[in-house]
Image (tube, helix red, strand yellow):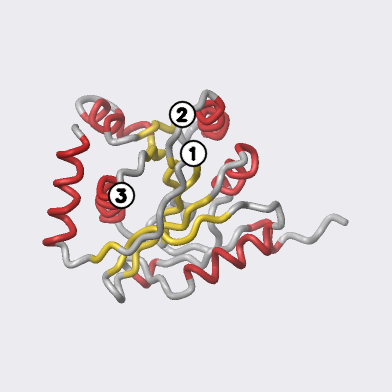
Amino acid sequence: MSRTIRRALARLFWRFSGWELRSEPAPHRAGLLIGAPHTSNWDFVVMLAIAWELEVPIRWLGKHTLFTGWRGPLMRKLGGIPVDRRDPSTVVEDVLERVRRGEVFHLVVTPEGTRGSGSYWKSGFYRIAREAGVPVTLGYVDRTTMTTGLGPTIEITGDVRADMDVVRAFYADKSGWNPALRTEPRLRAEDEPDPT
């Protein structure tokens, strides 16, 4: 699909959906793009509209079954990278290898890991950002204001609690599509005792 068609489709979405795009610029180098709060399948449509309007090259992780049959080529064309959840151990290394080869993209991750509420975010995004040395852009959906877009881009320092305090402050007033399903941004490592 050409850039022109993608941008036209995105503009149709913004015109008729009732949602407003508010965005800071995305970095011009490879990075991670957090999609949160992730509370609905509609988040995928919103993510595509943001990426196509802002012309941000994205990749995203999806369960391998989404890539079977006729859907496979379409999902890959939309930026999908299949993940076999029975053996997810190679995912981080695969993404890191793409970055090392010089591929410039923003990997969209939904650290809540599910569209239902939970206790913690998954930490894969943090590990990838640290190991690849790439920034993290905070993308959001907020139904209370009907706004969505990209917030600030941060560098991960390795101080998990301090980094997540920045993330929490940004998402504190973001509700997601279904506010009742929102998970507070917190990594399990923040609640583990300090080994020192």
Residue at image point 17% right, 39% down? 4
Does 152 sit above or below residue 53? below
Q: Nearer the viewer, residue 132 or 117?
A: 132
Q: Which mark is residue 30?
A: 1
The image quarter containing residue 165 is: bottom right
What amino acid is found at the position of numbered circle 2 in the picture? Glu
Q: Closer to the N terminus: mark 1 or mark 2?
A: 1
Q: Amino acid at mark 3?
A: Leu
Q: Secondary structure at mark 2?
A: loop
Of 133 and 179, which appears nearest the observer? 133
Instruction: Tell me whether the residue at label 2 lies in contact with that at label 3, contact meaning CB atoms closer than 8 angstroms.
Output: no
Q: Which mark is residue 103?
A: 2
Q: Are marks 1 and 2 in contact (CB under 8 Å)?
A: yes
**Residues marked 1 and 3 touching at CB (< 8 Å):** no
Give the SS element for disc 3.
Answer: helix
Query: Residue 145's spot in the image, x, y percent?
Result: 30, 75
Asked whether 12 or 61 is in front, the reply is 12
Q: Quadrant of the N terminus?
A: top left
